[in-house]
Amino acid sequence: MTAAYLDTLEKVVADVVAPNASEIDQKGAFPSAAIEALGRAGLLGLINATEVGGMGQAHRAAALVIERLARECASTAMVTCMHYAGTAVIEKYGPREICEAITAGKHLTTLAFSEAGSRSHFWAPLSTATRNNGLVQIDAQKSWATSAGEVDSYVWSSRPIAAEGASTIWLVPGHAAGLSIPAPFNGLGMRGNRSSPVTASEVKIDPSAMLGPDGGGFDIMMGVVLPYFQIMIAAVSIGTMEAATTKTAAHVANSRFAHLNQSIADLPTIRAYVARMRIKTDMARALLLDGIAALEAGREDALLRVLEVKAAAGEAATEVTDLAMRVCGGAAFRKEVGVERHFRDARAATVMAPTTDALYDFIGRAVCGLPLF
């Protein structure tokens, strides 16, 4: 029996997400219609508690929703992924009225953690937060934030005001005075996700905008954000792989050598490539589901699985979409086949912090019994 939220999602995908996916990619347009439709359907509040009008779901539901979106439009999936990552923090530490606005489909949020100075070490921001006439002044140069300029709030990291620790988390209004976007997003893939740099210059916020304790940002990042982020980015990769595999199989089954009266799929080498794509996709999904099960059961290997799943899915996605381009040949370079979009979208996961190389180091440390930090 399908979960009710997936039935609701399927209508949004069919009516809005899928029809607009190609145009969003080609124009680099923000998927506003899709996000509004998700909001009207209550899906922006998927992981909010039922007490504030949400659906009361968690990691598994978030992964399934993100994967389904990514099969059609990776930009929409990424915007929703980062909204859920920010929502998880707001749900735990933020004001009730913001949670209620999210569940009503009237508030979109995102993370603003990444900075050029700390690069993939997102847990060590250079942004500052200082007291200023009863308010808090935020100054920063964030290297990118998904949905920049489109959101109602940023879940923002800075150095602590006074406490020990690497960081403090804030809820910064999306259109606060002093926020600016120095350059528009024009990316290789996920072209509609608006991952632009954000500058904060003397942005004033109320001290009550602090999410969690001063200096407690690291624990929030690792305990709340990282599991959601890792699981969902893996889901984006898997959705991208699933789409590429399906389209590739359909292309080779329906394309023929007229003089031989054979389809391309009649070639054993082609079938072997498609089989590899299917296996890699299914392996990544199996690891994702096991990682979710580990989180839900509180298994001892839950952290290891959380670290593994993004690295494994991201690497698999580049391999699977490489194979899609090879198998579809010259036709793959045409937009109408669709695999070249997935090829470009798949490249993003390996370079999103924590990058695949950073995750390999963390995984190696965990396996060898060394401290992660």
Image (cartoon, rainbow, N blue to C red):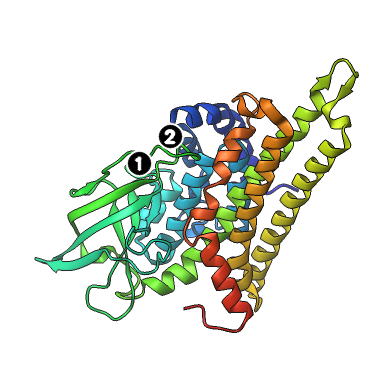
Q: Is residue 265 left or right of residue 216?
A: right
Name the residue: 9% across, 65% down: 133
Left/right placement of residue 307 relative to residue 151 reads right
Q: Which residue is mark 1?
A: 150
* Alpha carbon distance from label 2 to label 1: 9 Å
Q: Which label belongs to residue 32? A: 2
On the question of residue 193 being in view, the answer is yes
Which percent across, then down, holds residue 31? 46, 35
- Near-viewer residue (228 or 74): 74
- Quarter of the figure with residue 365: bottom right
Callout 2: helix, strand or loop? helix
Mark 1: which amino acid? Glu
Vertical placement of 156 versus 295: above or below? above
Of residues 306 and 133, which is closer to you in this image? Answer: 306
Choose top left, top right, bottom left or bottom right for residue 367: bottom right
Q: Amino acid at mark 2?
A: Ser
First of labels 2, 1 by sequence position: 2
Determine the residue positioned at 37% across, 71% down: 217
Whether label 2 touches label 1, CB < 8 Å: yes
Q: Can you say whether 316 is above or below 166 in the image?
A: above
